[in-house]
Image: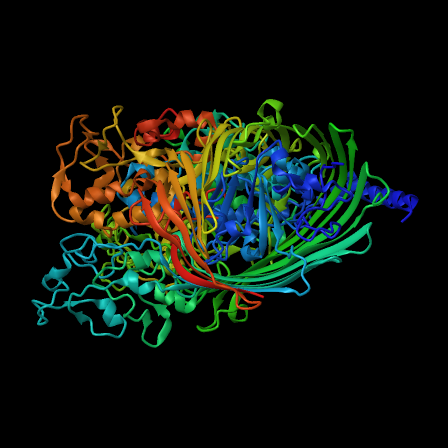
Amino acid sequence: MKISNLISLIAAGMLITAGSCTDAEMDRLNRNTSNPPAETVNARFQITDAIVSTGFSNIGGSYAWYVSSYNEQMFGDGNNLLMYAELRDPGVTAAATTFNNDWNTIYRNLQNIKQIIEKCGEDGLNAGQLDLLGMAETLWCIKWEIVTLLHGDIPCSEALNANIKTPKLDKQEDIYAGLLKTIDSAISHLTEADREHLDNVGTQDLLYQGSAAKWLALAYGIKARLLLDGMYRYPDCLTAIDETAQKAFDLGFDGAILDIFDNPDRDNPWAAFMRSRKYLGANGTLAALLAENNDPRLDMYAYDTFNTGILWAPAGDASLAVTTQQVGAPAWLSNTNAPLYILSKSELLLIQAEARARLGLDAATPMLEAMTCSYEEYRCVADFEYTELPTLPTPKATLNEVMRQKFISTAVTGPISFYNDLRRGRALGEEWLTPQNPNNTVAGANRWPLRLPYGNSDVAANPNIAQAFGTGNDAGMYIFTEPIWLFGGTR
Amino acid sequence: MKLYLSVIALGLAFNALAESPDTTYTDISPIDSAFFSQLDDLVVTAMGIKKDRRTLGYGIQHLDADQLNTAGTASLASAMQGRLSGVDIRPSSGSPGASAQIVIRGARSFTGNNRPLYVVDGMPVESTPDFSTGNSTRGANLADRSIDINPEDIESINVLKGQAAAALYGIRASNGVIVITTRRSHSKAAHPTVILSTDVSAEIASRRFRRQEVYAQGTSISAFSPTSAMTWGPRISMLPADSKYGGDRQGHPGEYYNPVLADAGLNGWTTPTIYDNIGAFFQTGITANTNISVSQHTTKGDYAFGISNSYQKGIVPTTGMKRWGVRALTDIKLTDQLSTGFSANYASTRIKSAPSANSAILNSVYTAPAEFDLKGTPCHLPGDPAAQISYRPTVYDNPYWWIANNSYNQNTDRGYGNVWAEYNPLYGLSEIFTLKIREQAGLDVYTTNDSDVLEMGSAGNNKGSIDNYGVSRIIFNNLATADFNAYLGTDWEAGLMIGCEVNQNNARWWNYTGTNFNFYGMPVIGNATSYSSSEYNRCSRTVGFFGNLSASWRSMLYLNVTGRNDYVSSMPRAHRSVFYPSVSLAWMWSQLPALQGVTAIDHGKLRVSYAQVGQAGTYLTDYYYTPQYGSGMYTYYPLRYPIDGISAYVPYQQIYDPQLRPQNTENVEAGVEVGLFGNRLHAEYTISYQNITDQIFSVPTAGSTGYQYMTMNAGRMRTWSHEILIDGTLVRGADWEVNLGANLTLTDNKVVELAPGVESLMLGGFTSPQVRAEAGKTYPIIYGTAFKRTDDGQLLLSKGLPQATAASTDLGNCSPDFVTGFNLSARWRRISLNATLSWQHGGRMYHGTNMVLNNAGVTMESLPWHEGTFIAEGIDEATGKPNTIEVERQQYYMNYYQVGESGVYDMSFVKLRDISLTWQLPDLGPLKLQLSAFARNVLLWTRLPNFDPESSQGNGNMGGYFERFSMPATTAIGGGLKITF
């Protein structure tokens, strides 16, 4: 080979090599061809999961499973995490790791909604889509309501910002005030959207198929519940609760039901959890109340799932908590197609009934209607067939009875709401039900969680939360001594 | 005329240019042959540059084929264990195809890749696992791709440990490089040499767990419970007296009733009998390796051709591995100036494994009550094979049902190799200068098809599922170099090598899953009624330009300077170009005139080096994805999109810092080497300091940011490592030769800081316990809930029972204090004995199996705790005074083994890794016969109770430190035959 040819060859090779690493070429190679860039996705595709996650992860996940044990609506067994919850073991109930998944998930969901709201802003991809905006704002309130009522003071104003890695804690008082404003904004936007017959979401809305009118009714229902949450701090809100709930019904509120489950493709989270772990059973406290009232819902609640003859377990029973597949579980835990209730009609009726009972107004009408609704909700989730409505008891609509009915109905539709109610009741000095779990106190010390511990990701990475959580033997123990601000505490 | 400079051969031992028949690596001519008489210790360094190891300014370790423990294993990692200093090899288990984590001089990345780069015959090949075991709390182990390399094909391995040694490989080589040269012939012969070798071994668990056989199934001493997962029940001998199931009062004296037996179609009434369920479950494993090779070395070049087969049957039924390999290489001398050749390898690897941790089948084996005949009791209802039954709730599979129905399969077909041409334009034109121009193009192409099959009736997924997933990779690597050498008078030698390399990696991952089978017996996609699928494509390219300048003075001082600039496509625009320098200096102090007359000293060297090498990360612009719903609370994905045709997008939970820049490892290394007494004693000490800054990792963000991770530069690690190597020939004679080697490694791998606000970082495991990196601590640690204690360390008891802290904490450092290996090689006439002993001191691991088995009352250690009450020592939390509350011993023991801290154990061990006896028979004409007998992992002393500490979860950085019903390590005994003609 001639040297000149060799040099030419080397020069050509170097040119090709140099050309293989230009910025344009490297950019082309590094393009993510499998996922869309954030700014190109229409927010109508985002609202879908904002809805689904609210039902599946926030209302139907670990938060609900654990608090249903605290509420004595379910019995935790299986010699594992839910057993420790049933035994009120602080190593689990106060641990930052216990609710870490739920904490992270709900903030991730909120990040999604935040970006929807931003895309609905001026110059956004979804600018002017008030129906979409109103839906996002309603879901925003539902999720923040869950996270602040369970955890108290939380990161909010500095949260959901990639540039602020250690967001500060906001006072619950401020967060709560903000939520009331946002739900009013949602109501305003949905009213406008309904008036203009907007339908920017359509089938991507798995709750109401894009109906702004139905979302508007739901927004009023959520507002009523938010107002009820604040009743201890703002006792003169009772009339507003009654009227707001009534407004929801006037607009046709018939329950916000996420009915997307269709085994084998999609399983209800309660049933999926049961199918996977079998950590839940029927709790004797609720079973006894149903039996005492001769309530037909008992058949669906205390169910001999494992053919052991053990239909339910006394709250806190250590010998049954250690077992698996012994204690019967409510029938709906076997129904993978059961719908989820983002806000059930029975709950909103009982919210109204409570307000009315406290105001001295007629509570019986909403309460009895709630019982009928609740029976239907039980039957629907348990997939029980019946030809005619069984005779339901007709107790007197006292405040205690309203709350006992709420205890029964929310076992199916919303244990988190009832956990909030129970703690609000404690703040008000009211005890509608006598807790039966002997593990709620140990040597005089309270072991019934007054709130849930922060998520571990923040305890580990956010000094503001780490400080609030505590260290060493004191870590997490504040959950037994300090109620959240809305329920009489300071934080 | 002496000419010695870098000799570029790019990993190929091409020696056609040298006419000398017995000189393996001489490839420059004309050369003073006297010089080469000194070059008896040539090693392949970066980019295939061969150098006398005595002239290197950095540490490198060379292993010949006969130093690899290949008998009875199909794994390269296993073959290297105990032989290398500064190299931590952690096998996940003795299961066929099990992954192994190899880390040289401590980790450089918190959560990313810490494995060295593998270079086979000059071509970088993929060695990392394509699928991570994630937190390693469910499913089966997944192999790393070094499993495709047949250790029997290897002629030699050079381990480039420090960054100075590896810097020429650039950004991929910060973890060191394992340079492999495959077998070829070196003796010129008229006929091809044929080698047939085979070895077969039988395997059992290296340490067999023995359970207590006194107490029966149940949750308390008072009652037999035929569905409990625990054995805290009554004494087995007392079962006939049990109030509910005992036969003494039900007309079956001496018997008891077990409804599970009745469910299985057997007579429910049975007499108390002890069964060895553990012994009955494990089978004798088999490993058989067979290799046939044909090779020849001629004046025109050489060639080698080989076929190999490895067959492994695991000790867990249905597990195993089959691997076929074919390889061919040629080195051809076309003219005095031009030569060419190729190396081609094909491997077909089939692995069947079994699940562990939360999906484990061994859980149900170990916890099976002694009075229950697990093997002899049908594992499903009569006539309904999908309805499995077990002695305990079937949240865990009955192991016999699992092996009859389920499987985890990994199938890879792979080809890799390269073609090259080398041009030596100055050949015959100059005696002062040489120039070599070389071009090499290589491919590493493979497809992995994995399948996780869960038949209808599986635990936690009783409708069944099949998960088919895989990856297809095409990696192209082009390397061009020009190597110029010059002799500059009597004192000076110098050389310059420049080159460029392009590496492009195209990968496509896919997954298609079918669930809910129509009927039992066809666990295939076609029988599913619900489907989901996904795919992901990724392409990356690295383009590097490099140079190597070397100079030596009077064969005493050797200076080597390298520089490489990489352009990396996976980084953001502003940070794609990265330059890495290295410099090394070796001083052969034994060449000092004053020492020339000292016959005891053969060679002595001081060496020092400095280098920087980095690792690139992956930068992507923020994107959305379609979520799916699953968590540790579910055993399957309960919800996936689309929902009746409606899909969704949400922001991905991980975001990327647009300012991402490559992380940097700065390394200073110094060493001293000495060869004494006619090279009968060689000793070497190396100290190395690595400062790893700008770590790229996915920083776990506070959940309240709305994201989970941000890929960014953060954190710093530093590693001090000390390595000592001693090789001595104790006896050398016509009949006898005894060599003894020892190596010692001390590695102090410390996490100096993580990201701002991040104190610790999870590497895998459960929420508690887990393996994690924590700022200010040695890397890594076990982290989890501890016992609540008073300030002076006493247990803080609640109702007389121990309790856990709500917060997790550091439960112990995983890294050993030191690791040492001893190698014996002895020969008497035609018989030789080889042995390797490993000693690891210190280091802690989470051993979930011990913890769970204690909690369930299964271990022998639990025996004193089944009956009676006592008052535990400790402080009563309620009163602050010494505890006076009497509790059941069982309850105390159970509570104790619920706290994460109770599962953390010292894993110090001494292990006889292998011992082999070889007999070279007298030649039978052209036939050379060699017989061998060998054993692996035959002796073990360890502080860990009940199990071998070298069995764990995970194929990543947590590997070796976290165990939970993992596949056991094995002991093997076997023999081999080698025929050469």
Rendered image coloring scheme: rainbow
State left or right for residue A325 relative to residue B920: left
Q: Quadrant of residue B437?
A: top right
Q: Position of residue A105 (x, y in %)?
A: 49, 42
Look at the image and tell me in which quarter the N terminus of chain B lies. Answer: top right
Q: Is residue A154 left or right of residue B665?
A: left
Q: Quadrant of the C terminus of chain B?
A: bottom right
Q: Nearer the viewer, residue A170 or A349?
A: A170
Left or right: B101, with B473 as reference point: left
Location of residue B655 in the rendering, given as x and y in whole percent from the top left corner: 60, 38
Residue drawn at the location 12% of the way across and 43% of the way down: B869
Quadrant hosting residue A417? top left
Location of residue A191 (image quadrant): top right
How many numbered marks, from 0 up? 0
Q: Can residue B946 be spotted in the picture?
A: yes
Residue B689 appears in the rendering: no
Q: Position of residue B669 (x, y in %)?
A: 57, 28
At 26% across and 64% down in the image, what residue appears? A307
Front one among B704 and B601 = B601
Expressed as whole percent of the image width and height from the top left, the position of residue B636 reads 46, 56
In the picture, measured across the screen, residue B242 lies left or right of residue A252, that is: left
A243 or B857: which is nearer to us? B857
Q: Residue furthest bottom?
A: B383
Question: B671 and B358: which one is in front?
Answer: B671
